[in-house]
Image (cartoon, coloured by chain):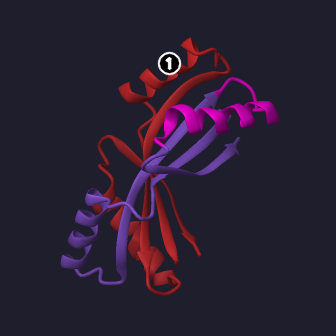
Chain colours: A red, B purple
Amino acid sequence: MPKIIVEVMPKADLLDPAGKAVANALQRKGHSEVTNVRIGKRIELHYANTPTEADLQAAKQIAADFLSNGVIEDVVNVIVEN
Amino acid sequence: MPKIIVEVMPKADLLDPAGKAVANALQRKGHSEVTNVRIGKRIELHYANTPTEADLQAAKQIAADFLSNGVIEDVVNVIVEN
């Protein structure tokens, strides 16, 4: 099924307590190579047909308007996946 | 900063109420081209140095053991991003 993938992450200068908790757990379990963890969202928009360039532009608008909170999050990627 | 990105999605045959709510909202707002929405997680593991092949293998294990619930979620991607 054709999809557009939208990736949203908490802004870099914001605390991410859930990510921090996972990072601490990995340290305790011996994975000292992982210095930090951040947890964001991966949102799949499904389409009946292969998304057009217009669909991609609309998806970028949707990502900014509906799928992310610009105060605390960044949209890091909007890509077509067939 | 070198990262490994882990992408986790709800299994295809599972209901995703949050995704469904977003899909319905998009329909109401006139984005009828989007037939469905599913919401998963995008997890960044940060590393001090460029991850090695061993780090990638460890990350795949971490993704399966810590970052996803195999009963309801699939790990769809584990990739190095420099």
B65 left or right of B32 in image: right
x%, y% of residue A70? 32, 49
Of all residues, the one furthest to the left in this rendering is B28
State whether residue A19 is above or below residue B38: above
State whether residue B81 is above or below residue B16: above
Residue A65 lies in quadrant: bottom left
Task: Tell me which residue sits at (45%, 57%) in the image.
Answer: B11
x%, y% of residue A58? 39, 75
Task: Tell me which residue sits at (49%, 87%) in the image.
Answer: A49
B19 left or right of B10 in image: left
Q: Quadrant of the C terminus of chain A?
A: bottom right
Of all residues, the one furthest to the bottom in this rendering is A49
Q: Is residue A8 visible?
A: no
Stretch in magenta: B47-69
Q: Is residue B23 visible?
A: yes
State whether residue B32 is above or below residue A17: below
Q: Mark 1 belongs to which amino acid? A: Ala
Q: Residues within 10 Å of mark 1 (few under 14, many from 20)?
A: few
Most common SS among magenta residues: helix
Please tell me whether residue A27 belongs to the stretch shown in magenta.
no
Task: Tell me which residue sits at (73%, 37%) in the image.
Answer: B56
Task: Tell me which residue sits at (43%, 43%) in the image.
Answer: A40
Please tell me whether residue B65 belongs to the stretch shown in magenta.
yes
* Disc 1 target residue: A25
